[in-house]
Image: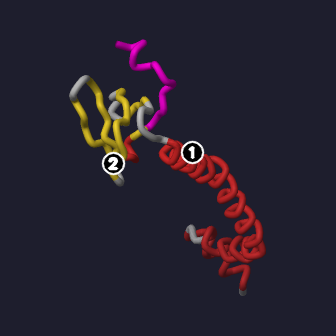
Amino acid sequence: MKIRILALLSLVGFMPLVHADDVAAAAHGGGMSSLIMFGGLFVMMYFLMIRPQSKRAKEHRNLLATLGKDDEVVTQGGMVGKIVRDSGSFFIVTFAEGIEVPVQKQSITQLLPKGTLKSIC
């Protein structure tokens, strides 16, 4: 009886549906391999994306902690200036003689060696 039903289903074109149950039953034991694959992807994402970004953020926090008066810096916009004073969450930076601009501390990207401004201008 079962052979006749399978033959009829194969003629009609439903054979893939009959074999789908067998494939699902065989794949049911592969749950552990899926878990291992997911874990491997997480480890790869951690080492390729999360860890380098947190390392860069830590370096930037250390840079901001070491900045003070008379340090020459570069802002995110590419402006080069000298820090005049610290006012809370802002640095007052002079970009030219007599031009002092408040700049958010987070927008300072790089500390330049002393004397860089004189060598550029």
Viewer-nearest residue: 41 or 43: 43
Residue 6 lies left or right of residue 109; in this view the side is right
Question: Horizontal and vertical percent for residue 55?
Answer: 60, 48
Q: Report which residue position mark 2 lands on.
A: 90
Q: Residue furthest left?
A: 98
Classify residue 80 as left or right of residue 66: left
Count of residue discs: 2
Q: Residues within 10 Å of mark 2 (few under 14, many from 20)?
A: some
Residue at label 1? 59
Tell me the tag on residue 114: none
User: The magenta stretch spans which residues?
Assistant: 109-121
Location of the C terminus by quadrant is: top left
CB of mark 2 within 8 Å of CB of mark 1?
Answer: no
Query: Could you say whether the residue bearing mark 2 is in a helix, strand or loop?
Result: strand
Position of residue 96 measured from the top left corner of the image (x, y, whole percent): 26, 24
**Structural distance between the alpha carbons of marks 2 and 1:** 19 Å
Please tell me how crowded label 1 is: few (under 14), some (14-19), or many (20+) other residues with Cα within 10 Å.
few
Q: Residue at x 59, y 53 (%)?
A: 50
Q: Residue at x 40, y 15 (%)?
A: 118
Task: Name the kind of residue labelled 1 in the image.
Answer: Glu
For discs 2 and 1, the disc positioned in front in the rendered view? 2
Q: Secondary structure at mark 1?
A: helix
Picture quadrant where residue 85 is located: top left
Instruction: Please say whether residue 111 is one of the residues in the magenta stretch.
Output: yes
Q: In x, y percent, where is residue 79?
A: 33, 28
Left/right of residue 29 with respect to residue 90 in the rendered view: right
**Magenta span contains residue 32:** no
